[in-house]
Image: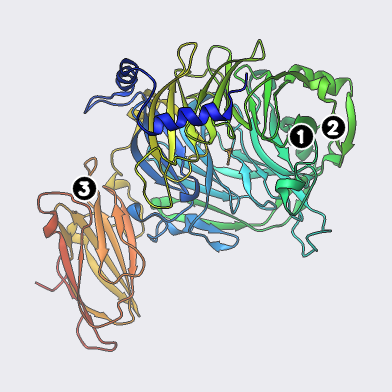
Amino acid sequence: MRTPLLALLAAALSFACGKSSAPLGAASDAAARVYIAPGQYDELYAFMSGGFSGNVTVYGLPSGRLLQQIPVFSQYPEKGYGYSEQSKALLNTSYGFIPWDDVHHPQLSMTDGMADGRWLFVNGNNTPRIARLDLTRFETEEIIEIPNAAGGHGSPYLTQNSEYAVSATRFAVPTPQADVPIKTGKFGGMLSFVKLDSVSGHMSLAFQILVPGYDYDLARAGKGPSHGWSFFSTYNTEEAKTLLEMNASQKDKDYIAAVNWKQAEACVAEGKGKAWSTPYAHNWIGEGGVAKSEMLRSQKVILPVDCPGIVYFIPTPKSPHGADVDPTGEYIVGGGKLATVIPVHSFTKLLKAIADRAYDGEVGGIPVLKYEAVNVCEVQNPGLGPLHTEFDDKGFAYTSVFISSEVVKWSIKECKVVDRVPTYYSIGHLMIPGGDTRKPYGKYMLALNKITKDRYLPTGPELTQSGQLYDISGDKMKLLLDFPMTGEPHYAQALPAAVLKDKSQKAYVLAENKDPYVTRSEKDVKVARQGTKVHVSMTAIRSHFLPDNIEGIQVGDSVFFHVTNLEQDWDVPHGFAMMGAGNSELLIMPGQTRTLVWVPQRPGIYPFYCTDFCSALHQEMQGYMRVSAKGSSVPLVWNGGAGTLK
Ligand code: RUQ
Ligand code: CUA
């Protein structure tokens, strides 16, 4: 039975007034299940998409404690990310420097279908990009732009051994881009495969597949028997260009595109990919921790007509969003936003349908398979608006249902709903730790909710989003915890803390710092003028900077503060802030060098200071710059190193 909306609403309201109908015993039991005593560690690391913040946030589970924010596609003041000279190049694109994007899907790197804790990949949705984050330092290390695409939503969704990260066009556009009338112009879509180096993780665009101009939404790779295939959901197969809410809902079924990427590789090897030349940026942290950026211009585009057998369309009701693959790799589950059932397709049947040529026509050289030939069953009564499905370790699937704000648990074998719980409210994705791997961890399920109206103290028009943690170890799902989140938590990934915690880096080794402006000891600090550029090689250690007095700076100079943190202890960053600096502040990790550029505008004495409370004498960690008029004869002098200012 579908839970009536009214009943859900009533349940929601009673929670909102603090009058939970659950007995007190249950509440304290739930509290005990998520209680992590002071000083104790959480059981799992969870990586949440920060949505329109452009960041990734790291939480501990089951406590729901926020542990870290990792800036990825947006400038982020707390860490000087995208402001310091060393990190700016990470945000380069073929459109120039972009300081803000929208993150949707984190995905942990995998070995043999299991999260291996090496890297985390996330997609940039607006200007299509994929980023790779290093999980020893919890930092963004590389970003690649996806050319010939608009909206990188179905991304990054890695293959079983991290061979590829993928990106699918969300918004059909002329492909390649062209100046055409919107109404009559021919639009296309692109499914992009980014190769990941198995040792370094480095990303390179391997090939792209040109597909009809639908909206490609989400993706999942096959695993086990279906390894070698990736599945992409599509909506708007109507190819509407205006008022999609109505015009893209005409057909009863859209498609899941099944892509045989091993065959696509073979096609490219046979020289069947066409050479295109759209510019795209590739950025990475190079030698010395300094970000580099290159503009690339060549890609290999495969047209399905040239390579029969690389793409098939599986009809799937109705405007599917999710396309999720179960732990065995046999079942592909659609999540039709407007569908009244959850369709379950079978990989075995897919192969047979292809062998039997059980087609219902074709589009653009892509065979459309017969629905019955691939579908094994439809889960009835899934609620209103099924979206995404994750899996546990006991043969159950959990589907998030947006409109009726609930999670339905269903048996894969019996193809029927066995339990359902309300979420508060409007759940998008859900996440079971390892729920997309071959062996889900399967103890918790996290609902990632879009709306929290009446759940927390009001904070003006903008309310936080939330995560709700459920215990799924028994037959019935039980709500344990409800906690606010940063940005919009589209999707998340989690893995046992033991996989990562001992690999976490504690400091950068000063002796290995290869920044071109590193200063390894206080003897070496200096200030050097080159025309109107002044390079200050400065050190920071508890609790002073050197030099901390500099004279001879002139209005109109560009002063480069290259600050090296000489500390080698864990958790001793120093900050650096300069009065009137139009760029940013810095946060410098132990052993690291970061650079801030300051263009003084008026003569005077300007203080700078450490912004991170590093020691008992942190407040003493400050200094002065003397700025004189342009052309002044005040000599360039400083204290420390070979400086002459005493
Ligand atoms: S989305 S709520 Cu992944 Cu951007 Cu589904
Ligand atoms: Cu260094 Cu405070």
Which one is earlier in the sequence, the residue at label 3 or at label 1? 1
Which one is earlier in the sequence, the residue at label 3 or at label 2? 2
For ligand 1, the image quadrant comes to: top right
Badge 1 crowding class, 10 Å Cα cut-off, few under 14, some 14 to 19, many 20 or more, is many
Residue that mark 1 sits on: 255
Give the CA distance from mark 3 to mark 2: 62 Å
Kindly check if marks 3 and 2 are in contact, taking CB atoms under 8 A apart as contact.
Answer: no
Q: What's under tag 3, amino acid-wise?
A: Glu
**Quadrant of the rendered structure where residue 569 is?**
top left
Near-viewer residue (279 or 254) = 254
Near-viewer residue (476 or 511) = 476
What is the secondary structure assignment of the residue under circle 1?
A: strand
Q: What's under tag 2, amino acid-wise?
A: Val
Residue that mark 2 sits on: 368
Kindly check if marks 2 and 1 are in contact, taking CB atoms under 8 A apart as contact.
Answer: yes
What is the secondary structure assignment of the residue under circle 3?
A: loop
Q: Is mark 1 within 8 Å of ligand 1?
A: no
At a point 75% along the width and 35% down the height, the residue shown is 264
Kindly check if marks 3 and 1 are in contact, taking CB atoms under 8 A apart as contact.
Answer: no
At a point 88% along the width and 23% down the height, the residue shown is 358
Residue 567's tag is 3
Residue 201's tag is none
**Quadrant of the rendered structure where residue 197 is?**
top right
